[in-house]
Every structure is written in structure tokens, then in C-alpha cells.
Amino acid sequence: MKIDSTKKRLILVDLDGTALKNDGKTLHPKTKQALIKAQEGGHIVCIVTGRPVRAAIQYYNELKLNTLLTNFDGAHISDPIKREFKRLVFPINYEIIMEILNDETINKSIENIMLESYDRVLIWKKDENLENFFHLNEIEKIGIDTLIVGNPWEFWKGSSTNIVLKLKGEKYLHRVIRSLAKFQDAVKIQSDVLYGIKSVDKEPIITLTNKNVDKGFAAEILAQYYNKDIRDVIAFGDQLNDFEMLRKVGVGIAMQNGASTLKFIANGITHKTNDDGGVGDYIQRLLKGEEY
């Protein structure tokens, strides 16, 4: 595809499987360079990720951003540097959280629970896999939020941007999903997925967010804030949590390593994978107005 290279664009980029290499820790040098150069050329770059702030802020700083940061697939939008934008949080309310945790079927099926708000995280029991996956071991170092280890029925008060339920085993998965159906007007259910990637834990993990949250909704907020026609917004993603974002914007680009469903609705597909700097390669050519 080819675009008008004279327009200053809003560029939205996912992290895992997109800007980050397969190690989930490293920005590909070509991608990093291209995103920084795009900013120097007057384009606006925003990270839109399923990760919490503590697991994204390193890359926000590495890319020299001062724009809005979107976390939890749109459930949390903040302004880490300028602080001119009032934080937006789309939570699950406390009463619904307790109803879910006290549901008889769900309660009997749970091995562990995690609750998170913008400034605190609770994990019911110590769990190395969950702690690594959710970057809980980085909380003290980064100092953005507070970690609570303890009984959620006793130590958690207030709303939460997400609920993580680690189940006792595979046989509990479908019965829990059936029980969660009664809360479908309040929450969105994802099984084994966060950050757009699948958990490697042996016990099934279900993540819940506010029903109305998705990256497409976040893209509209970001476009409005930066006075950009949504048709002039470029977005990069690789998994189904990026679906609404790529469908909503004018230039939705799926990664070569991305999900087939995403590629079907995308306006373009990168020639290279995330591990080979696919985002950087595509941006360099696209913003020059080259056919790609």
C-alpha cells in the first residue's frame, strides 16, 4: 500500500509480538530507530498494549515518548510525562468483583486470584509463574504501584481494571466460563490471554476486563486528543486483542507473525516479523510514501 507522505500521522503500536522481539523484552533496533525518527519528523507515536504500566514504561522511555500511554487494552489511559490528560480508568466495580469471587462454582475452581488497579496489585498466593508473567517482581524497583499479597476478600477494596483467575485445572475451565456468563453485561472474558499472548502456565488463566474496553475504543480517544482524523491513524498489531484497533483506524497493519484473522481485516501486512524489525521496516517505507 501507499499513503500521502505529507500528512503528520498518529502511529499506534502494540508491544508483544509487534514492537518487541520474541523475547518479550527487547525493542528491535530498526523498530526503535524508526519510531524515534517518526517523532522527529512530526508524527505522534503512542503505545497501546495489554500490559500494565510497570511492564510498558521502560519501552515508553526508551522510545523517548511524552504522549498518552494506553494499558490493559484500553482500560487505563494515562499521561506519564506531561500529566495534562486526566487519567482514564475503565474498571470493574467492587460489587461485581465480589459477586464473581463469591460465586459458588467459581470459588471452588480457583487456585489463585490477582486484582489490579492503576496504583496497586493484589495476588492471593505467591506464584512464580504469575509473578513473572505480570512483572510483579518489578513493582518495588519501578515504584509505580503497590503489591499486596493476601486474601482478596479481606485486603481488596474498590474497583479493579482487571481480574485474573488461575484455575485448579483444565476441567474447571468451561464450568467457570459458564458461571461467568451471568456477568457478561459487566465484564469481557479472555481465556489464557494477556498482552495479546497466551499464558504458558499449566493451569488455565482467565482474565476479565470492563466489557466496553478494547484497543479500538482507545484509538478513537487518542485520535480525538491529538486532533487526528481516525482515517489518518496508523496502527500495528499481531493478535486478536488488536483486532478492533486495526479495524477502526485508516491504516491498520498486521504483523507477518500475526494471527490470520487479523491479517484478513488489515490494510497491510509487514514483510518482516517482529523479531526482524517488521514495524520499523514498514514505517520507514510507508512514511516516505513508497509503495509497500
Image (cartoon, rainbow, N blue to C red):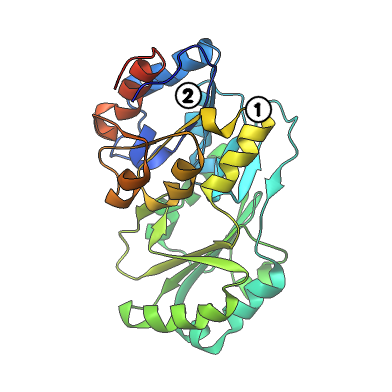
Q: Residue at x 35, y 31 (%)?
A: 26
Q: As drawn, is 20 to the left or to the right of 121?
A: left
Q: The C terminus is located in which quarter?
A: top left
Q: Residue at x 29, y 39 (%)?
A: 23
Expressed as whole percent of the image width and height from the top left, the position of residue 2 reads 36, 21
Q: Is residue 150 visible?
A: yes
Q: The N terminus is located in which quarter?
A: top left
Relative to residue 225, is residue 154 depicted above or below? below
Expressed as whole percent of the image width and height from the top left, the position of residue 154 reads 67, 74
Expressed as whole percent of the image width and height from the top left, the position of residue 47 reads 51, 34
Residue 111: which quarter of the image? bottom left
Q: Mark 1 points at which residue?
A: 226
Q: Which of 228 and 67 is in front in this view?
A: 228
Q: Which of 230 and 131 is in front in this view?
A: 230
Question: How many numbered callouts?
Answer: 2
Q: Spatial distance from mark 2 to mark 1, Cα to Cα?
A: 22 Å
Residue 62 badge:
2
Name of the residue lying farthest toward the bottom: 104
Residue 97: which quarter of the image? bottom right
Q: Which residue is drawn at 59% across and 36% down?
A: 69
